[in-house]
Amino acid sequence: MAAAGAARVLYAVACGCPPAGDLGGFAGFARQQGWDVCVIATPDGTKFLDAARLAEQTGHPVRSQYKNPGEPDVLPPPDAFVVAPATFNTVNKWAAGISDTLALGLLNEAVGLGLPAVAVPWPNAALARHPAFRRSVAALRDWGVRVILDPARLPGAAPGQPVFPWAELRAELASLA
């Protein structure tokens, strides 16, 4: 947890789908709101990010792999988490307690520590109807994770381009303080 007077630390976790490429805009907004933002990406999430630009913007390296034993932590400890976008795979693994990536390991620790978290799942409409996904979203909500999910706005739910709910996430950021 951040010391009195220090910036609160937000871990922004990005998974592998196109909205991850827009994480810089959210990170900039969070910094304006007084957060020290650290970006964590799943291995596939790195394919959509400009890691160098995000590192310059946040002042922290973008992490996607566990550190080697004995290496110091390069990021400050988190006060809260945002997972945006959260893929079908990450939501289901998180709810199952699987920690096979740095991102999932940190998210599972966050649940165990009772840290506030907001997740914005972004599967396609068909995957959002999968029974395992519905159970996973319900489990995350039961654990206190705030989930922003409107199935009608997901890719493949309606004609036209889906619009990722960045505005809703920005509004929810204040509740993480």
Image (cartoon, rainbow, N blue to C red):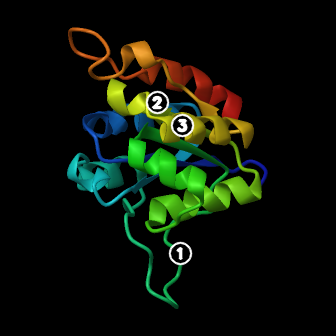
SS type, badge 1: loop
Circle nearer the N terminus (2, 3): 2
Position of residue 160 relative to residue 146, above or below, is: above
Which corner quadrant of the image does residue 42 belong to? bottom left
The residue indicated by pointer 2 is 29
- Distance, label 2 to label 1, CA atoms, is 25 Å
**Which of pointers 2 and 1 lies earlier in the amino acid sequence?**
2
Please state, as top left, top right, bottom left or bottom right, where the C terminus lies in the image: top right
- Relative to 173, is 21 above or below? below
Seen as rendered, the residue at the extreme bottom is: 70
Residue depicted at 64% across the width and 41% down the height: 140
Q: Give percent across and percent down for residue 105.
A: 54, 65
Separation (CA) of disc 3 from disc 1: 24 Å
Image coordinates of residue 141 in percent, x first then y, are: 67, 35
Depth-wise, is mark 2 or mark 3 nearer the camera? 3
Q: Which residue is mark 3?
A: 119
Q: Pinpoint residue 172: horizontal percent, then vertical percent.
A: 60, 25
At label 3, the amino acid type is: Ala
Q: Label 1 belongs to which residue? A: 73
* Left or right, residue 112 beside residue 63: right
Amino acid type at image mark 2: Phe
